[in-house]
Each structure stands twice: as C-alpha cells, then as structure tokens.
Image: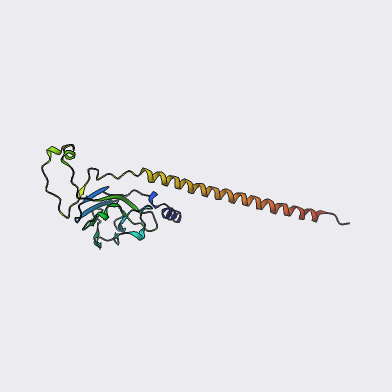
Amino acid sequence: MRIFSVLLWILFPGCWAVTGVTGPGAVRGPPGGSVAVRCRYQSGYEDYPKFWCQEGVWGCSNWHHIVETDGSEAEVTRGRVSIRDNHTQRVFTVTLENLTRADSGTYQCGVERPGLLNLWASVEVTVSSAVPSPSLTARTPHATKQPDLPPPTKAESSFSPTAHTTPARFQPIVICFLLLMLLKGLLFLCIVCAVIWMSVRYRRSHREMVPDRQAQELPLC
C-alpha cells in the first residue's frame, strides 16, 4: 500500500496536498528587502525534516528543495534562504533575504515524511515596491481608528489581508480528479483484458484435451 501511495505521489504530486501544515497563504516584500514565512505543523512531526521549495507544474519533489532541515532545531542557510524549526511551538520559519522580482512565485513549506506523502501548504510570494493607494486603505474596515505605523523594516514582512487563507486551487483539483479517473479506467481495462485472456486460454486448453480423451476411449479392433 505504501508503494502504491508513493507511485501516485510521483505521478500526481500536485493532487496530494495532505493537510497537516498551515502557512500564511501570501506574503509580500520590497526588492532588496526580506520576508519571513512562518508555517505551523501538527503535533508528532517535531523531529521530521522541514522544507521550502518552489512549486512547479507538478508540484515540487524531494530532490528540488531549496532548503530543508535535518529534523533538528539548527538553522540551515542556503544562499539567500534560511530555515529554522521550533519544536516547542511547532513552527518553522523560512527567511528570504535580498529579494528580487524573480523570487515572486508560488512556494511550498512542508514536512517531509520518508516513505509517505509530504505535508505542505502553498505560499504565494510577491516582490513589489508598490504601496496601497489611500483610497483603498480608506475602504478597509476600521482603517480610520488605527494610528499611523512606521514603514516595515528589512526583517519584517507585509502580509496581505487574506494572509491566513490559502488561494483556491479549483482547476488543479479538477485536473487531478480527471487524471485519477483515467488511471482507474486504465486499471479496470487491464483487469478485464486479463480475465478475457485467461478465459480464452482455458477454453483452448479444454478443447485440446477433449479429442485426446475421445481417442483414448475408442475400442480397439
């Protein structure tokens, strides 16, 4: 069963977003600045490796992790990206330094489970120096009641109003469903062909045995 699960993950990795990890959903940072992405995981996975990777057409595999831990709380740094786990709070933080516009995209923060499906959450990273216009800010509920805040520092990240929601992925789910149905149809067709082939082979062998028996039963003159 485990081998079948791993095979399905290899064929359709984007279809198996197993819950167990929650992320901010979307983060934004200015060019040259940095963002810190905090992802939470369920109890029981404290000693499992945590990873950060960029999501492609077929998700991201264990061989394309940008940075990952070894299961401990030691900080790991690769280039401009670092990751650190906190077992007590069950939170690992990924920090992206010296942002460029090429860093914009969809990423995954997750827990690596050897032999099983990984647990992960999608995070949309946007690198932009644009500031919301006053008209949009004025429409935000309770915007007039909040005091002016200083501009974010390099180590801070600005989150969108929907930071704790994961973007809808309706179209990939439909594609995954169709692919799985196609896989089930192919498996069913293989089973039917195997049954028909065994039935035909049995009938041929039975027909070959009947003349031999009749020849043995004929009386000798």
For image coordinates 77% across by 53% down, the residue present is 211
Expressed as whole percent of the image width and height from the top left, the position of residue 218 reads 83, 54
Q: Quadrant of residue 6?
A: bottom left
For image coordinates 69% across by 52% down, the residue present is 204
The answer to whether residue 171 of the structure is visible from this angle is: yes
Expressed as whole percent of the image width and height from the top left, the position of residue 25 reads 27, 47
Which of the two residues, 140 or 187, is positioned nearer the viewer here? 140
Expressed as whole percent of the image width and height from the top left, the position of residue 78 reads 26, 63
The answer to whether residue 24 of the structure is visible from this angle is: no
Position of residue 190 in the picture relative to residue 3 (left or right)? right
Quarter occupied by the C terminus: bottom right
Which of the two residues, 20 or 219, is positioned nearer the viewer here? 20
Vertical position of residue 93 compared to residue 134: above or below: below
Expressed as whole percent of the image width and height from the top left, the position of residue 10 reads 42, 55
Quarter occupied by the N terminus: bottom left
Vertical position of residue 160 compared to residue 216: above or below: above
Position of residue 29 in the picture relative to residue 5 (left or right)? left
The image's colouring method is rainbow
Which of the two residues, 129 or 72, is positioned nearer the viewer here? 129
Question: Number of callouts in the render?
Answer: 0
Q: In which quarter of the image is residue 208?
A: bottom right
Position of residue 198 in the picture relative to residue 106 (left or right)? right
